[in-house]
Amino acid sequence: MADPAQASSDRPGTTPAPARTPAWRYAVGMLGTSIPINMIKGSMILYYVDILGLDVRAYGVVMVVYAVIDAIDNPVLGHLSDRTRSRFGRRRPWLIVGAPMLAACMIAFFSAPASLDGLGLVLWFAVFAILCEAFDSMLNANYGALLPELYPRERDRAVANALRQGFQLVALVISLAVTPLLTTKVFGTEDSTQGFQITAIVYGAIAVVVIVFMALGARENPRYATRERPPLLRSVWSIVRTPLFWTVGLTGACYGIAMALVLTGLQLYVRYSLGLDVGNTFILQGVVILVAAAGLVAWTKVVARRGALWTWRLAFAVLAVSFAALFLANDLLTALAAGVLVGAGWSGMLATNDLIVARVLDADAARNREHREGLFLSAFGFFGRLNGVVTGLALTSLGVFFGYNSGADPGADPGFAFRVYLCVYPFVLVTIGAIAARLITVPHETPPEAADPVEDPR
């Protein structure tokens, strides 16, 4: 009997299917893509606003500007990736080039000269914040596009996604929980900036090695690159006319913005709201991340039994309740108890949100017979860019409503200000997302390539 894979490769006009990329080899890339951007987002307010004295109003303006720029360059980067044709594939060249560029910009971001203040500090912050976000978008659009391409079958995709989310949690332990210890205890002090620069150099080196290792091992399917290359504007117009793009994108943005608020404000929540040293962030973040990691196994089993959509809705509800509990915490012990709930809800979102997005990509590929995952994910990145706008406005609101303008001008009650920033705002957003998720139906359409034979790696 003829081998199916051989028969497929013998058909005129076809290309042999590539050997399967081991799920762990793809998933480990999440470690490299997550460490730099999470250090940037998790420490930028502490570094620039609280230590260097950047005014929160300037911070808010920069976040709005960079969100607008990023909303423009994201679709362009994704479209260029989809149109790339090289013997190295469509995605790998962008990953290998983007990794060292992001690392270099991150190091510069945390190396602001001590002599800078006023407009000079604002410009330094703006330039490198925008560059870091642009190269992070380049990496994540290409890395994310590989998930549905390398694993067209949903069962394989769910395993790869669970593994990569596990690596993301490891990255969060490193970039969020360990970072305060490295920057304030090991390489620097509570009120200095030297520790941030050294930590950025270490993290940048780790990220480059991991991303390049992953990219070199990713076996892209050449069939995905044989389609016609449509022009940018026509493709964008087709995407924005897709109802699921808006409903899933906006609902997911409620979750993404809420977690961005937590990421950017947790260290100052610990400092002001709980009245503890910033180093204690390690304990709180560690508990949240450990619970989230352990919960991935349980949530993946729920997905297998009840489906991604049902589980997605449940995870939204759990996450909303967790922020209410976090608002009531008044010391490290009660914050840790609330953190268990946060970790459980967050874990459910990690296990399901990308699967919902992947269904939208499958539906687009089945409907249009074109694989434009890079552009589609970059278009979804538009909703991610709302993170910067909303976090900037949220931080600015602390100055308007509570008098917190910077570390040098914290107002009368910075503790309550950051309780609102970290708990109330996320609760409102996630509650809106939970309601919207109940109203959304995302059908599962298997892409044609799911039926292709896949060679076993030798």
Image (cartoon, grey):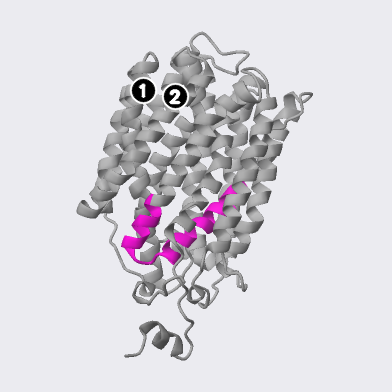
Residue 138 lies in the magenta-colored region: yes
Q: What stretch of residues is rendered in magenta?
A: 134-162
**Residue 212, image x, y percentages:** 60, 56
**Residue 279, image x, y percentages:** 52, 20
- Relative to 110, residue 373 above or below: below
Question: Along the horizontal axis of the image, is 204 left or right of 119?
Answer: left
What is the count of numbered marks?
Answer: 2
Looking at the rendered structure, the kind of residue marked 2 is: Ile
- Relative to 65, residue 404 above or below: above
Residue at the outermost right position: 115
Q: Which mark is residue 283?
A: 2
| Marks 1 and 2 in Cβ contact (< 8 Å) | yes
**Residue 399, image x, y percentages:** 54, 19
Report the residue at 45% width, 15% height from top. Answer: 273
Looking at the rendered structure, the kind of residue marked 1 is: Leu
Report the residue at 31% width, 40% height from top. Answer: 295
The residue tagged 1 is 336
Residue at the outermost top position: 412
Q: Which mark is residue 422?
A: none
Q: Nearer the viewer, residue 338 or 230?
A: 338
Residue 62 lies in the magenta-colored region: no
